[in-house]
Amino acid sequence: MQTSGDTSRHDLTARPWHIIGAGRIGALAAFYLQRAGAHTIGVRPGPAHTRRLSIGFDQHEDGAGSHLALRIVPPSECASVSRLIVACKTPYTDAALARVSLTDDATVVRLQNGIGSLDGRITGHQRMIGAVTASAVMSETHDTLRVVAENATIFGGGERPAWFDALAAHWPQLSWARDIRPPQWRKLVVNAALNPLTAIHDVPNGALLERADLYADMTALIDEADTVLARLDPAWPADSHADVAAVVRATAANTSSMRADIQAGAITEIDAINGWLLRQAETLDLDLPTHRRVVAQIRQLEST
């Protein structure tokens, strides 16, 4: 007799999972999917190959590592994609998705920072599932990743799909939220307050609590973000200071993703984070002077 667990596992493994952006978080997602028995395929322009990675986990008591072998294929070799994880940097989303042919009933999991990168992209009977993670992964070498924080991840948006329980059994601290917006917004405020300031001033996260000038700017960014979100949803608690401070303390020695992008001369995700807040504020006739300033500063850094 087939159990609910058997049904969930069968649904998870019945179709391959394609991954756009199999870098750090994308590779970790592929690792969990493979551990659950799913077939995973990375999608990237260029010749087909197998990417082999060693993955270390700081929070494991024995420090034990694991290995991932992920087949990477160009979009031309992907037929109709019915299960897709989007984990690329938000500025590259449009170009990446334009190369992929989704089935009419495709499920797309958005595992990215910020908000809005898939707006208008998921249509008809296709389904988008939002994902928010507090895990952090660093690249030590080209073929070595280190998971410095294996923390909670939330998928959500409507009814839980049949495959979810089978994946959650192998993805630590993975949970489902029928309403994904509150966790998305909480992560958004953290990113909007932390990322641009650490990138502009080229400092680790902890400096935001140590320097009076940075703390003042961080406070202003949080207040402005909370004002917008409370106007969008009166149920929003509009007091994100404690949440942001907790993340800054927990990651004090870390380099934010936006700081790393600026250091590498790469485009940042500012448009999907602070830029999204500015676009919402414009529709509400609100002014966010601190967000406007940091967005302008990041764009200046991107252009130099």
Image (cartoon, helix red, strand yellow):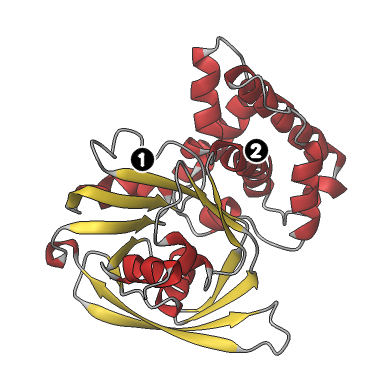
Q: Amino acid at mark 1?
A: Leu
- Front-most of residues 30 and 268: 30
Q: Position of residue 100 (x, y in %)?
A: 20, 54
- Tell me which amino acid carries mark 2: Val
Q: Is residue 91 visible?
A: yes
Q: Label 2, on which residue?
A: 189
Q: Is residue 236 left or right of residue 80?
A: right
Give the residue pinned by disc 1. 118
Which quadrant of the structure image shows residue 62?
A: bottom right
**Which x, y percent locates residue 44?**
26, 65
Placement of the N terminus among the 4 image quadrants: bottom left
Q: Residues within 10 Å of mark 1 (few under 14, many from 20)?
A: some
Which badge, 1 or 2, comes first in the chain's sequence?
Answer: 1
Q: Residue at x 62, y 64 (%)?
A: 173
Any mark on residue 303, and which?
none
Residue 226, located in which quarter of the rendered image?
A: top right
Real-space Cα distance between discs 1 and 2?
19 Å
Q: Is residue 159 above or below residue 260?
A: above
Task: Please identify the residue farthest to the top as the structure is shown.
Answer: 285
